[in-house]
Image (cartoon, rainbow, N blue to C red):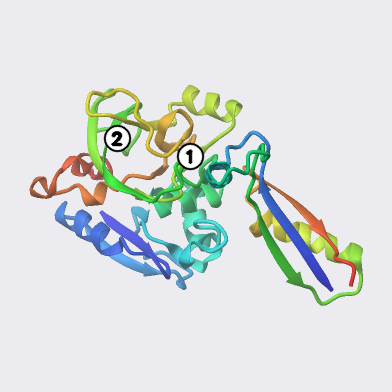
Amino acid sequence: MLVAVAVFPGTNCEIDTKYAFEKLGQEVVLVFHKEEKLPEGTDLVVLPGGFSYGDYLRSAAIAKFSPIMKAVIEFAQKGGKVLGICNGFQMLVEARLLPGAMKRNENVHFISQFHHLKVIANDNTFLRKCSVGELLNIPIAHGEGSYYIDEAGLKTLYANHQVLLTYTDENGNTQNPNGSVDSIAGICNEAKNVFGLMPHPERAIEAILGSDDGVKMLRGFLD
Amino acid sequence: MKVIVNIQLKNGVLDPQGKAVHHALASLKFDEVGDVRIGKQIILEVATDDQAKAKERVTVMCEELLANTVIENYTIEFPAC
């Protein structure tokens, strides 16, 4: 599988993301934001974490107009698989590839810690290796990760199994770190080829460093 | 011509920054403050004398980039000067 990881000015998780997919035996290419095309034969595009364009105006507000994003949007609209992690998730909502919007964390703090997540839906490529209700321990690191969607939008998300992950404590009880609607940590689009989550699975791939639960998630994209 | 864009979170969308500042004001004994909402102001210098035309263009700028209309409202003003 060929994984294209997009790199914007201010992106800082591209090497971790590359390392994670290479550890799983995949070919990874870093693609600079000024490129207008994705590499021939790209199977998965990853928009990694960081602070693209210094988070000026709003997180990811400017990244969505990068030349490479035009190619990513076209790729997604043709059914290509796209994964947005943290700042990448923010890009996907700013680009309207995913519904809703991202706000400042409710406590106005930047939060960086391990957090438990509960799998809400697994009838999708991303979480097919996980079971519904399963708990995963994955780091979060964000200041603007409070997911917002209106009531009608939320209903649609649930009806289509687009709510993928919610924040919980280690026992699976809801524990909302940032004020996200319904404690939502990750969603997908209706066609289930575009995935976004605030937690960082690429930072949880070595048990010796705290958790390797991220491997299970990333494996979903492998054949 | 100078154009001022004011952007604020929509009513009903919680403003955590405003809430934190409200708490801080209360701790300084400014008890008369009932609510605080924080927005942002963007000042544009637009190369036109046609106010209607400027408003039309700045509206498109707001919709495409300056505001996230899922959660934010915007107003466009022309300061007298």
Looking at the picture, does residue A85 appear above or below residue B13? below
Give the alpha-carbon distance from disc 1 to disc 2, as whole Å.
Answer: 20 Å
- Asked if residue A221 shows in the view, the reply is yes
Q: Is residue A150 above or below residue A114?
A: above
Question: From the viewer's perspective, is A60 left or right of A123?
Answer: right
Which one is nearer the viewer's eye here, B30 or A44? B30
Q: Is residue B11 above or below residue A198?
A: above
Q: Residue at x 54, y 51 (%)?
A: A94
User: What residue lies at 74% left-to-right and 59% top-to-bottom?
Assistant: B5
Which element type, helix, strand or loop, lies under badge 1?
strand
Q: Position of residue A53 (x, y in %)?
A: 48, 67
Mark 1 = which residue? Answer: A147
Q: Amino acid at mark 2?
A: Leu
- Asked which quadrant contains residue B59, the reply is bottom right
Closest to the camera, between mark 1 and mark 2, is: 1
In the rendered image, residue B48, in percent from the top left (x then y), is placed at 86, 75
Residue A40 makes an appearance in the image? no
Disc 1 + disc 2, Cβ < 8 Å: no
